[in-house]
Image: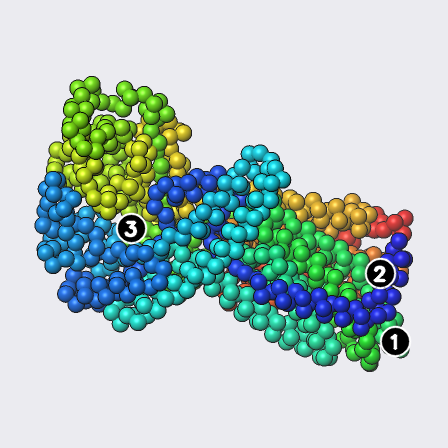
Amino acid sequence: MANAAIKLYDSVVLGRPLVTLLVIAVVTLACGWFAKDFGLDATTDSLTLERDEDLTYYRSIRARYESDDFLIVTFTPSEDLFSEQVLADLKQLRDALAAVPGVDSVVSILDVPLIRSPPVDLQDLGSGMRRLGEKETDRGMAREELLTSPLYQNVIISTDAKTTAMRVDFVQDEEYLQLFYWRNSLREKRLVSELTADEAAELKDASDRFQAYSQRALAREQEQIAAIRAVLAERSHLGKMHLGGVPMIVSDSIDFIRHDLLVFGLAVLVFLLVILTVAFRKPRWVVLPLITCLATCTIMLGVLGFMDWRVTVVSSNFVSLMLILCLALTLHIIVRYREIHAAQPDADSMTLVRTTVRRIVVPCFYTALTTMVAFGSLIVSNIEPVIDFGWMMVMGVAIAFILSFTLFPAALVMLEPGEPRSRHDLTAAITAFFARLITRHSKATLLAFAILAVICVSGVARLTVENRFIDYYRKTTEIYQGMELIDRELGGTTPLEIIIDAPVEATTEDDDLGFEDEFEEEFEDFYSDDSEGGAGITATSYWFNSRRIPDVRAIHDYLDSLPETGKVLSIGTTAEILEQLDPDILQDNWGLSIIYRKLPEDVKDILFSPYLSDDGQQLRFSIRVFESDPTLRRADLIDEIRRYLVDEMNLADDQVHLSGILVLYNNMLQSLFRSQILTLGVVFFAIALTFLVLFRSIRIAVIAIIPNLLAAGIVLGVMGWSGIALDIMTITIAAITIGIGVDNTIHYVHRFNTEFESDHDYWAAIKRSHATIGRAMYYTSVTIMLGFSILALSQFVPTIYFGLLTGLAMLVALLANLALLPVLIATFHAEGHLTAADR
């Protein structure tokens, strides 16, 4: 069967190179057409766990209460915020923002209702409220109220009155919401039961329609954000302005992804051009590898565009990876071709290419396979963008391998070999140095790597998953500056929501609501004369009444006392405002019911709707956490809050729900340790099996895996000692390091087997292996190291860490494979046999 495959390859690829190139050109052009549909995804869903129950709950809470999909514009004028000129400037800015197409409303300090400017009575609460933008409002009183109001302080104005914030809401997209809930309802049904054929078809249709519409909606939102930025830029002379909010982070993250794809792709391409020119100094060894790499990337982009498979912040560097990995394959072919050409200077092109392919295809196949296994191991991470990244790279490496052994040889066979070049260069000197070093100091080599292993193990023990989302971005970016300002001046950034349900029995048994019979009779008499009829909110709500409000305020005060929390808003805030109007109102259920019923809807939307469900049986505490706090430990904070509510407030565990972006992000972070262990376990198991199949020796399989384990361990150890936390990018480094680093191991052991068979002298075989395959290992490793280092130009900090740490891992893997691996073979395998042929 192998002979048949060889003959078919020789007759098709090498025998008809023009046909091969034509077919590849057609496929590449077709994929290039679909590449125009290639898209990006930086939504918050792309940073959450697959099948996270908290995500489902979060979406249901967003549907019931207010959404966090709004923009925040901060404004720090150079003059007094409450001066006539600044307020006029603020009004113009607000009106200009409101005029942006797609903006539904803009709320500023000019628009919020005031109850003490001048003071109003409870009976005038609906009609007597003032706003700062109205002429009748006492500006001095308004300033004092805004700075002291529990509802506005650290929300729309800083405590020093130097910075204010405006909330910009977009027009609600009903079609988007309908498609979103349609798709998600079918997804949730799929989790609990098997879908019928019709339901599966409906889910596919819903997913396709939602995906298409969401991309149009996202593009429209990006245009709106660009228009808002233009408004701010036109008025930048008025003071310092920053834009914040989830939609802006999504928009800017997409820009970062687009920037990384373009800049890194071009930078790596230029870098590869320089490397190939310096290393080989012959046009064919520059042009052919670059054409192969570009064709690989074009086909992959086309596949992603055709499948509507979106690239996220995690996979934003996949083009650079594709270029680097594809070049690594072609470099091995080039080095082996040049080696054979030097040994057979009179051979024709067909002979040289055929011999090269036959000698290099097996180790290259296994190196591609192990790299695919390494990336494939990411699918067990349970983090959707990491899973997608893994599948993308599996497909990409497969395409790179196919083109490296079709396009590259087909083009090469059509060129005359020319004169062989001398192989005595710097690379040969470096590999020869390593061969001499380990031959003379084998025990010292083992001791040095053993010490490194101990250091890396101690560093791994220091690894953590706690990191700050704000640190994902450079300090020069608007995302960082806006989040830092809102954190510092306006009560925190990251949303956390505490949802507390009424006890189940309280929603079904009237006497559990805590009212005396005579109080209920009083309500019946009152509402019998009310044209609207029905019982008051305090009679039907478990929470909003004189008996429960003290408990609500106690919870509110506790949450507000935590050092990690900034602004806390709840019905407790509403109660404090009502108490300012009438110190006795909180003991008067009758009065509370009247206030609730008679309030205008716009005021009720501020004081009640965000914090109390319509039936009064559910509380919502809206909290903003200081994202820039370096001591923030999300998991500890969540556990502490839950423990207090259950143990101190005597709430049942099923009454308490913590939700919000902080919880979803924490779930993802806490899964990283498990994901890291799973991915490493999968990749080591799969590579060990590959080694057993390839080398047919348990001993050599164990020996071969040690250098790669050490390389991954050293990188994780460096992260631990440096305080670099695991995140959605760095979690992939260890598996990728092993997958790429093991390529060198396979090539070296495969070549060592061949050299050892000639004289059965371990150290002589090691020296010859260093002089031959060692050169290719050096070229590929240096190329990968320097290629990854280009990622340091990113605006996304995890990408910077990914590039630098992966480059470090490749350096360690190269050193381990040129120094540790040969010593292990010579020391621990001298009494055994490497191949079946030896036996």
What is the spatial separation of the Cα atoms under label 1 and label 3, in whole angstroms? Answer: 75 Å
Q: Secondary structure at mark 2?
A: helix
Residue 647 coordinates in the image, percent (x, y): 35, 28
Mark 3 element type: loop
Q: In the rendered image, which residue does mark 3 sit on? A: 491
Going by the numbered disc 3, the residue's amino acid type is Gly
Identify residue for label 2. 755
Say which label, 1 or 2, has the lower sequence index: 1
Q: Position of residue 133 (x, y in %)?
A: 17, 58
Task: Inspect the image, locate mark 2, and give the three-letter code of the amino acid beneath it.
Answer: Glu
Q: How many tags in the picture?
A: 3
Task: Report crowding for label 1: few under 14, some 14 to 19, many 20 or more residues within 10 A (C-alpha).
Answer: some
Q: Is residue 355 above or below residue 582?
A: below
Q: Position of residue 776 (x, y in %)?
A: 73, 66
Q: Earlier in the sequence, mark 1 or mark 3?
A: 1
The residue beneath circle 1 is 348
x then y, percent, for residue 582: 12, 37
Residue shown at 32% from the left, 68% from the top: 231
| 453 left or right, relative to 663 | right
Location of residue 388 with respect to 790 vertically, above or below = above
Chain-order first, disc 2 or disc 3: 3
Q: Residues within 10 Å of mark 3 (few under 14, many from 20)?
A: many
Mark 2–mark 3 Cα distance, whole angstroms, equals 69 Å
